[in-house]
Amino acid sequence: MLTLPVSAQSSNNPTYLAIGDSIAFGYNPLVLGSADNFTGYPEVVSGSKRVQHVKELMNIACPGETSASFISEGVPDNGCRDYKAFFGLHTVYAGSQLSFAVTSLRQNKQISLVTISLGANDVRVLEFGCNFQPACILAGIQGVVTAYGANLAAVFQALRVDAGYTGEIVLVTYYSPNYLDPIATGGILALNTVAQQVAGAFGVEIADGFGAFAAAATPFGGNSCLAGLLIKLPDGTCNVHPSPTGRDLLADTVLIAIGKNKK
């Protein structure tokens, strides 16, 4: 069994565990330095006055994490292991993210909220492997989505059964950088659809990141960049990661999901 580092065991006795990829981590390509300089939606949620039971956060998300590398370190990812080794994460831990999450939930029964963003890097790995050729991506997307569904089920099984966690889990669905791009949006929709189906089998709530971004981007022709939801780069284009406005919007979707469950 993985043992928690002393720092993680003794730091504030967290009540909120955030897991996933760069979206949960709060990655910003324009920011340098330690993980403390990055703020993701989990930090916004934990600091919100709209909730009272998630004040102490442990964010273990890793930029570049795929659904497969989340479970096992011995499979390809989209840069998570390198990022973890060279730059560091919000929380220091060894082993896979899933093994650490399970151990954390077993050892800390005060955790009452888990959020997860996971799967976008599965598609990114496909895109890189296809050199971003549409025909190749379309041919491979179903296999990626099928594998993602199986991996996500294994993750929730581990959290619910292996960790014995019966508390609230919220899955944040992915947004599209451009809702008028049929290939990108179609792949994200396929990912989100499977995620919602798997989540339902494990009593996992859905935070509708896809719908929230779509509504905010509609006045801008469905373009999340023009809507100010993505990080603006010096050349005027946008990175795929959420801007502070987009990050706060994702946090709102989590708070809405939590609020529905508390009524």
Image (tube, grey):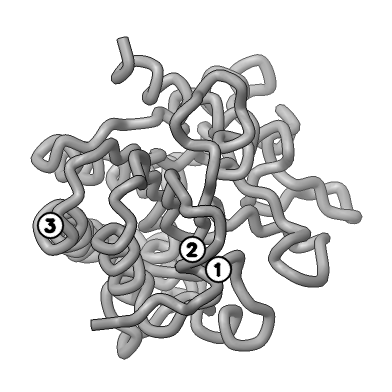
Spot occupied by residue 64 in the image (x, y as percentages of width and height): 51, 70
Identify the residue at the far top of this view. Answer: 263
Q: Which residue is mark 2?
A: 60
Q: Earlier in the sequence, mark 2 or mark 3?
A: 2
Q: Which quarter of the image is occupied by the N terminus?
A: bottom left
Image quarter for residue 32?
bottom right
Q: Is residue 243 left or right of residue 14?
A: right
Is the Cβ of the residue at disc 1 closer than 8 Å to that at disc 2? Answer: yes
- What residue do we see at 63% from left, 51% from top? 241
Q: Which mark is residue 157?
A: 3
Residue 37, percent from left and from top: 77, 59
As drawn, the label of residue 206 is none
Image coordinates of residue 210 in percent, x first then y, are 44, 32
Name which residue lies at 43% across and 58% down. Answer: 20
At a point 56% along the width and 37% down the height, the residue shown is 46
- Identity, as a three-letter code, of the amino acid under mark 3: Gln
Provide residue 153's location: percent of width, then percent of height: 15, 56
For marks 2 and 3, give the CA distance.
19 Å
| Mark 1 or mark 3, earlier in chain | 1
Quadrant occupied by the C terminus? top left
**Is residue 139 shown to the viewer in this render?**
no
Residue at left 48%, top 75%? 78
Of circles 1 and 3, which is in front? 1
Would you call the spot at circle 3 few (<14 residues within 10 Å), some (14-19), or many (20 or more)?
some
